[in-house]
Amino acid sequence: MKPVELLERLVATASVSGDESRIADFVARHARGFGAVVERSDNNIWFSLGRGDGPTLLFNSHLDTVPACAGWTLDPMKPAWRGSRLYGLGSNDAKASVAAMLSVAECLAGMQERIPGRVVFALTAEEEIGGQKGIASVLDMLGPVNAAIVGEPTSLEACTAQRGMLILKCVSHGVSGHVAHSRPSTYADASVDREGRSHGGSVNAIEVAARDVTRLAQWEFEPHELLGQTRAQVTQIQGGLQRNQIPDRCEFFVDLRTTPNLDHSSVAAEIDAALESEVTIHSARYLPKHTDSGHPLVRAALTANGRDTPVGSNTTSDWAFLGDLPVVKLGPGDTQRSHRPDEYLEAEELAAGIRVYSQITRQFFEVVSA
């Protein structure tokens, strides 16, 4: 099957997160068709090629897509060519990477004795929802791995740094009262502690939250060389019981897309110490990632894509669940097309992705064997 035909088949197979069984079936059949010994857990598919007596390189990308958003002018579930562009849900993110990896695997399957090590291909589920049944659930089943390529639309740039995600839950406390008796007040005026205990007066918890939101908007973090600064973004806020009552509680969430030079626990503790509100960590499982630019995998990727330097990636990916494994995130397609209407991939981008993945494989084993 030609790579463009393979991509068409992948796009035509619906695989919204949590419903990847049909595409997992298809990928497993396709891989068995060129001789791979396929293993499966839930909707995760993987197989190994090579002699197995050298280092192991992992290729990982995801089978799932987000649901189709509003604004599509074409049927998102029917792959359609318009000139050199293939339109369809997932064509860019990240079925192009899947198609490129499978095409490389088919070539390698016919020359396994010449691979001085092992190449593992893991095509996994639930990446778009950070699910527990994706790459994290099968990583230990893949055997020892020395380095990994994570397939995402990066315009074939070698991304060696990726942002993490830290979500904080903040609760401001006040003292309720009738709005008719309100006056400007602070915790000091009312002798209120952070848990809302008071010895008199009233405190508007929304005003307390507003002061903290302003502090967060002005917060400056140490920048990262590839990713720049982290910003604290307040994304949800809720407070008050009714219109004629001073609110005694306000809750808001803060989303921080962190960089590898920031420790989640330290950031949370620093913010907690500076705010009037009570701060707790709501989610910290997406850790920021970084691979040293001198690692053999990075050198192989830069040689393969003809670039001089790596770049950073603002989006998260399954890299977050690969522990301390050296990783380069790289794949055909453009991240700006992801999760948007009329998603597409250029045919040449797929061809280039296959070339780069093939060259990375060759370069990696040459570098680590030198």
Image: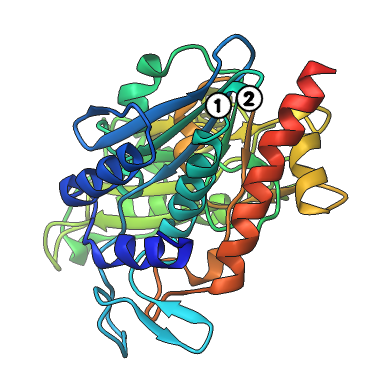
Label 1 crowd (10 A; few <14 / some 14-19 / many >=20): some
Is 80 left or right of 329, judged from the image as shown? Answer: left
Is 58 left or right of 137, judged from the image as shown? Answer: right
The image position of residue 174, as x and y in percent, is: 29, 44
- Front in this rendered view, residue 272 or 141: 141
Disc marking residue 71: none
Residue located beneath label 2 in the image: 115
Mark 2–mark 1 Cα distance, whole angstroms, equals 5 Å
The image position of residue 333, as x and y in percent, is: 56, 64
| On screen, residue 155 above or below 88 | above
Tell me what residue is drawn at x 54 percent, y 69 percent.
336
The image position of residue 108, as x and y in percent, is: 55, 36
Label 2 crowd (10 A; few <14 / some 14-19 / many >=20): some
Tell me what residue is drawn at x 24 percent, y 51 percent.
23
Residue kind at label 2, given as amino acid type:
Ile
Q: Residue furthest top?
A: 53
Residue 15 visible from this viewpoint: yes
The image position of residue 205, as x and y in percent, is: 31, 50
| On screen, residue 78 above or below 165 | below
Tell me what residue is drawn at x 40 percent, y 50 percent.
208
Name the element at disc 2. loop
Residue 286 visible from this viewpoint: no
Residue kind at label 1, given as amino acid type:
Gln
Q: Quadrant of the C terminus?
A: top right
Name the element at disc 1. helix
Are dots 2 and 1 in contact, CB under 8 Å? yes
- Front in this rendered view, residue 76 or 172: 76
Determine which quarter of the picture holds residue 1: bottom left
Tell me what residue is drawn at x 38 percent, y 60 percent.
6
Residue located beneath label 1 in the image: 112
